[in-house]
Amino acid sequence: MMSFIRIYGLFLRHFYLITRSFPRVLDLIYWPSIQITLWGFISNFFATHSTYYNNAVGVILTCAILYDFLFRTSIGFNMLFLEEIWSRNFTNLFIAPIKIGEIIISLVITALIRALIGLIPAIILTSPLFGISLLDLGVHLFLLFLSLYIFGITLGIFVSAGLLRFGPSFENIAWSTMFLLAPFGCIYYPVEILPEFFQKIAYSLPLVYIFEEARNILINQTVNYENIMNAFYFNGIYLLLAISLFYYSFGQARKKGTLINIGE
């Protein structure tokens, strides 16, 4: 049985590490706010030079916020796991003893808080600066954010599994994963723009269904529940694969004896 006390204890460790360090808090708030502000001005320019969207500022800026939440969730999970590796503390956790599932759950919870710390100020800025509100997506906003959160955590678990298998040399993948998937996620443009082969790849990812639905709600004022369900369907598949791979990588690292050297 999992111990919620151990999960809570590990959560507090990361939570205090974040909240007691001003540079860490500043980093969480600074980059999302800068990105949203920058994209807001780019969107204003786009709105005056194109008729592709009826509301270019609203559509593009909303998608930018959704993407930033995804990016922050994935990177947040990776950063928390890397903190354990950099401090050579990962193997020390099992002295508790603590289970792998408890480590994953504590990182999942803390990653959400990290993402929200950076996201909320950015969302607040959009209203006075650009007159945009994510509430235009209605109650379906929660479903879109939940789906993005699950996929972000899934990517984080995939990368963490790679870190267990290949060690710190896998760190670069942690920073590049989202940038590699971004073209196939169709964040700022419809999927039809992609070549046919790339479209097949895009439709195998939950991202395309999430961002297509966000644009559909904003532009057409309708909701396609099939997109939402497809996103959760693929999220479920990838999440199970990620967790299975994480357990497998952990088992292999322990058998080969590389687990104790993971921080070096």
Image (cartoon, rainbow, N blue to C red):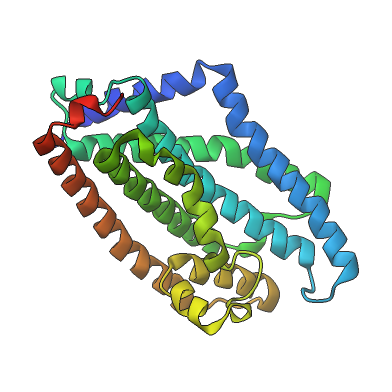
The N terminus - image quarter: top left
Is 22 above or below relative to 104? above
Q: Nearer the viewer, residue 214 or 72?
A: 72
Q: Can residue 5 be seen in this view?
A: no
Q: Horizontal placement of 139 versus 7: left or right?
A: right
Is 204 above or below relative to 58? below
The answer to which image quadrant residue 237 occupies is bottom left
Q: Where is residue 11 in the image (x, y as percent from the top left)?
A: 34, 28
Q: Is residue 219 visible?
A: yes
Q: Where is residue 103 in the image (x, y as percent from the top left)?
A: 25, 34
Q: Where is residue 247 in the image (x, y as percent from the top left)?
A: 18, 46
Is 97 above or below relative to 44? above
Q: Horizontal placement of 45 versus 161: left or right?
A: right
The answer to which image quadrant residue 258 occupies is top left
Kindly identify the residue that appears in the image at 84 percent across and 76 percent down. 51
Q: Which residue lies furthest to the bottom in this view?
A: 196
Kindly identify the residue that appears in the image at 55 percent across and 24 percent down. 24
Kindly identify the residue that appears in the image at 17 percent across and 38 percent down. 253
Q: Residue furthest top?
A: 20
Q: Which of 130 and 107 is in front in this view?
A: 107
The C terminus - image quarter: top left
Q: How many labels does the image show?
A: 0
Q: Horizontal placement of 85 versus 64: left or right?
A: left
Kindly identify the residue that appears in the image at 33 percent across and 27 percent down. 85
Q: Horizontal placement of 187 versus 43: left or right?
A: left
